[in-house]
Image (spheres, grey):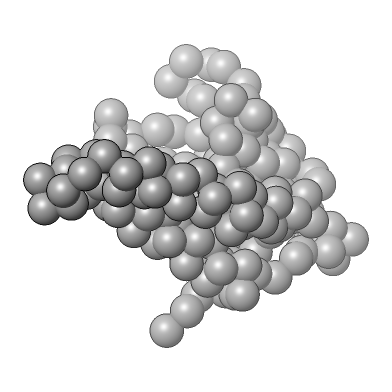
Amino acid sequence: MSKVKYFTESGLKKLNDELHYLKTKGRTEIANQIAEARDKGDLSENAEYDAAKDAQGLHELKISKLEESISNARVIDESEINTDKVSILSKVKILNLSFNKEFQYTIVSEEESDLQSGKISVQSPIGKGLLGKEKGQTVSIDVPSGELKLKIIDISI
């Protein structure tokens, strides 16, 4: 059973662009690698050919996964996001109570997450821990390094 995944318009466009690349130039590059390896002689003892065929299988798997994600994608209308509680696409300003340091994250789908851009996955421990919480609430979240105590300072779009 497939799971609905929520994206921003730009996030879904990025996935579609990647899929287009993999189906066109990516497949052509893999086919060229296979042809080049095939030209090198006996296929039963040709490690390059085997590696190219393995790469082709991984490439097709990636295409399949992207197609599945796109087919189950729903674009979120930012005007419908409620800023009373943390939800997907919320920008959350939090205070890490252990370090007394503020951070701001946008809660996004797993495929759109990019910590350097301040986008964390809704599936991450912090993302899951913040979902449904309100401004002013303090939450304790179990993360691999221990327990985080965070206070939600602001929720916006």
Q: Residue at x 26, y 39 (%)?
A: 40
State which quadrant residue 140 falls in: top left
**Looking at this view, is 114 or 44 the one in front?**
44
Look at the image and tell me whether residue 127 can be seen: no
Q: Residue at x 84, y 58 (%)?
A: 78
**Looking at this view, is 117 or 53 the one in front?**
53
Find residue 38 and report its horizontal and vertical position in percent.
30, 48
Look at the image and tell me whether residue 28 can be seen: yes
Residue farthest to the left?
45
**Looking at this view, is 59 or 10 the one in front?**
59
Find residue 62 and report its horizontal and vertical position in percent.
45, 57
Residue farthest to the bottom?
1
Find residue 48 and report its horizontal and vertical position in percent.
24, 39
Q: Answer left or right for 59 relative to 96.
A: left
Find residue 98 and report its horizontal and vertical position in percent.
43, 20
Vertical placement of residue 34 versus 1, above or below: above
Q: Residue at x 28, y 29 (%)?
A: 145
- Check the picture and name the quadrant holding the N terminus: bottom left
Q: Answer left or right for 83 relative to 5.
A: right
Q: Answer left or right for 84 relative to 31.
A: right
Q: Residue at x 40, y 33 (%)?
A: 148
Q: What is the tally of numbered marks visible in this picture?
A: 0
Q: Answer left or right for 58 relative to 104.
A: left
